[in-house]
Amino acid sequence: MCRINPRVDFAFKKLFGSEENKDLLISLINAIISPTDQITEIELKNPYSLANYRAGKMSIMDIKARDKTGKWFNVEMQISEDFYYDKRAIYYWAKLVAEQLGDGMKYRELKKTFSINILDFDLIPDTDTFHNLYKILNVKTGQADTLHDVFEMHYVELSKFKKAYHEIATTLDRWTTFLTRAHELDKNNVPIELAVDKEIVKAIEVVDRLFDDDERQIYETRMQALADVESQISSAWDKGWLEGREEGIEAGIEKEKLNLARSLLDILDVETIALKTGLSQKEIEQLK
């Protein structure tokens, strides 16, 4: 059985963001994007590094990569529910677009950019579809065109994936099954529905021996921190609503956002706290 949860961002980053596992990342990306955009090679722009993590340079566990044709990808696994994740995803996509243009570069040199967001919670309302794609459309025709084919935002909501093994039909089905059922999988007895894909088989084997002792300690600490954050966020929202009955709903919730931010300063960086609470980084800095 897999002892590591690949949905935890630290584990996801090492599994898909390491040089030795680029084939897994390529397979995952190709399972999500269209057949016309398939990739064969990729360059990691922020590969997994234990030293960088310890130095506080990997607080956001996204994976940035570029393929040989110049297309850019930002892949992120988010296990904790985040009410502002849609805005966060757009922000990181915009940053990636801006990073493409160096001094003296022309706008015509901008390449297509993909934002791939794998979520362990429901974000998109009114649909049971687990993979949703957003792109620029002409609102009059309802169609995309080559003129604005520079952006794709993909959401894979794992909690909406309900397929049994006999219903698995695509590579994305197989990757989603791996991510959601890793705890059930045995590298010595891989279900035939997954075994047809060599990258899935490799992922099952790799995740079981993913960490050394130091990394495992970081992983366990990360797991505990995620649990603590979820508990504190839940309590803060409950308390905010209760206090809001007396001092106004918005005022009560705003007060608890500040209290929550203070409690997270010892375990999370300012940028992550801002994304979790909806407060600005300036507001959080003032709490120190």
Image (tube, rainbow, N blue to C red):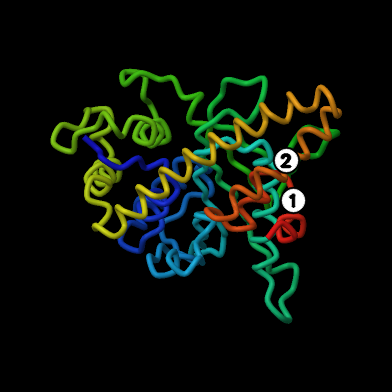
Q: Quadrant of residue 285?
A: bottom right
Judging by the rendered image, the residue that carries numbered circle 2 is: 144
Q: Quadrant of residue 185?
A: top left
Residue located farthest toward the left when viewing the structure as drawn: 188
Q: Nearer the viewer, residue 264 or 38?
A: 264
Q: Nearer the viewer, residue 114 or 222?
A: 222
Give me the residue at 66% from left, 26% from top: 238
Quadrant of the image containing the N terminus = top left
Q: Is residue 210 above or below residue 58?
A: above
Q: Tell me the kind of residue under disc 2.
A: Ala
Q: Is residue 155 above or below residue 37?
A: above
Q: Nearer the viewer, residue 272 or 147?
A: 272
Residue 100: x %, y % from top left: 65, 68
Quadrant of the image containing the C terminus = bottom right
Neighbor class of circle 2 (other Cα within 10 Å; few <14, some 14-19, many 20+) is few
- For residue 162, side relative to residue 132 (left or right): left
Judging by the rendered image, the residue that carries numbered circle 1 is: 148
Q: Nearer the viewer, residue 24 or 144?
A: 24
Residues at marks 2 and 1 touching, judged by CB atoms closer than 8 Å: yes
